[in-house]
């Protein structure tokens, strides 16, 4: 990957970023990779990637507005605002050019960021995600706000089990019980505020209504998808790869929406090969 790595002390880089508002964790050495988490999640979702990827990359992992350890959002915002937050993080850290990884909703942010600042992104990986507009919406079921309210009014442990229901992530239960136990423990220990979840949900629903000019994305792009993903069906990955010039699609077999943890070696290997093969 043709980018310069900044090898400042990790603690000083992290502190500089925290001073800007959103909480960001930075670890590793090598070319920078900005890793953007999905809906209702924080950067802990990447923690199992760290032992493998930090040996080759500097991982920059923000918590989006109102999530994790970032301060609560005080007003409505859009996906474009989250893209600007992420870009500001990289600017404050001194990374002029960087690789970009978007997971689920983080993929929405990544698409918006690369369209807004194409000169900053060397390559992009989109995992388990979709895009906006009616063509993608035909394949992407969206939960209603009242249903979401009901889930997030549950106690954290009950909410975690609802999010990991076998009807949503079947392979997690049938093939990856250790990953299920890990996710249940991590999710049950977190209690996201309903008002912050609703602000993020409204940003997502607004994004999904409008198609993006995906044909303008010029950086090398890898689309990763779970073969049996019920939350973001595989057809969305196929469409993304078809609409982004030169994009390539890799499908992880025997996985669902949580393929990025279910096939940890496959995903981290694909990311390492992709970003290091990108000129």
Image: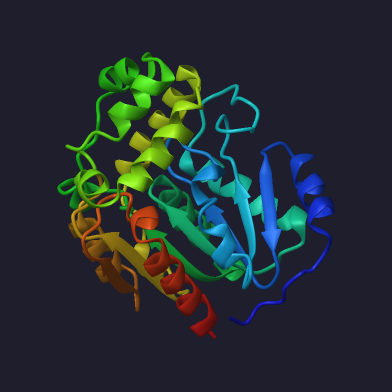
Image position, residue 251 (x, y; %) = 26, 67
Image position, residue 17 (x, y; %) = 75, 46
Q: Quadrant of residue 30?
A: bottom right
Q: Nearer the viewer, residue 106 or 183?
A: 183
Q: Nearer the viewer, residue 8 or 254?
A: 254
Q: Nearer the viewer, residue 82 or 57?
A: 57
- Which residue occupies 57% across, 66% down? 53
- Which residue occupies 30% across, 35% down? 164
Image position, residue 51 (x, y; %) = 58, 61
Q: Quadrant of residue 160?
A: top left
Residue 190 located left or right of residue 29: left
Task: Examine the rendered structure and indicate whether residue 168 appears above or below residue 272.
Answer: above
For the N terminus, give its image quadrant: bottom right
For the C terminus, give its image quadrant: bottom right
Residue 256 located left or right of residue 260: left
Residue 63 located left or right of residue 170: right
């Amino acid at each position: 990957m043709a980018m310069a790595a900044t090898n400042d002390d990790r603690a000083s880089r992290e502190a500089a970023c925290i001073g800007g508002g959103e909480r960001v964790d930075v670890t590793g050495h090598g070319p920078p990779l900005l890793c953007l988490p999905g809906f209702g999640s924080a950067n802990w979702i990447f923690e199992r990637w760290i032992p493998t990827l930090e040996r080759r990359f500097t991982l920059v992992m923000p918590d989006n507005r109102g999530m994790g350890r970032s301060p609560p959002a005080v007003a409505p915002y859009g996906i474009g605002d989250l893209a600007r937050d992420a870009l500001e993080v990289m600017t404050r850290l001194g990374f002029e050019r960087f690789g970009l990884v978007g997971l689920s909703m983080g993929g929405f942010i990544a698409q918006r960021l690369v369209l807004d600042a194409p000169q900053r992104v060397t390559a992009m990986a989109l995992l388990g995600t979709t895009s906006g507009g009616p063509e993608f919406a035909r394949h992407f079921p969206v939960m209603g706000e009242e249903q979401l309210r009901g889930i997030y009014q549950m106690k954290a442990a009950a909410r975690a089990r609802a999010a990991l229901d076998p009807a949503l992530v079947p392979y997690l239960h049938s093939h990856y019980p250790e990953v299920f136990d890990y996710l249940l423990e991590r999710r049950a220990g977190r209690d996201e505020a309903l008002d912050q979840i609703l602000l993020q949900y409204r940003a997502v629903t607004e994004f999904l209504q409008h198609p993006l000019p995906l044909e303008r994305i010029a950086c090398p792009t890898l689309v990763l998808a779970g073969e049996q993903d019920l939350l973001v069906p595989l057809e969305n990955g196929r469409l993304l790869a078809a609409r982004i010039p030169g994009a390539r699609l890799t499908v992880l077999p025997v996985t669902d929406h949580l393929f990025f943890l279910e096939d940890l070696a496959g995903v981290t290997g694909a990311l390492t090969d992709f970003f290091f093969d990108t000129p």
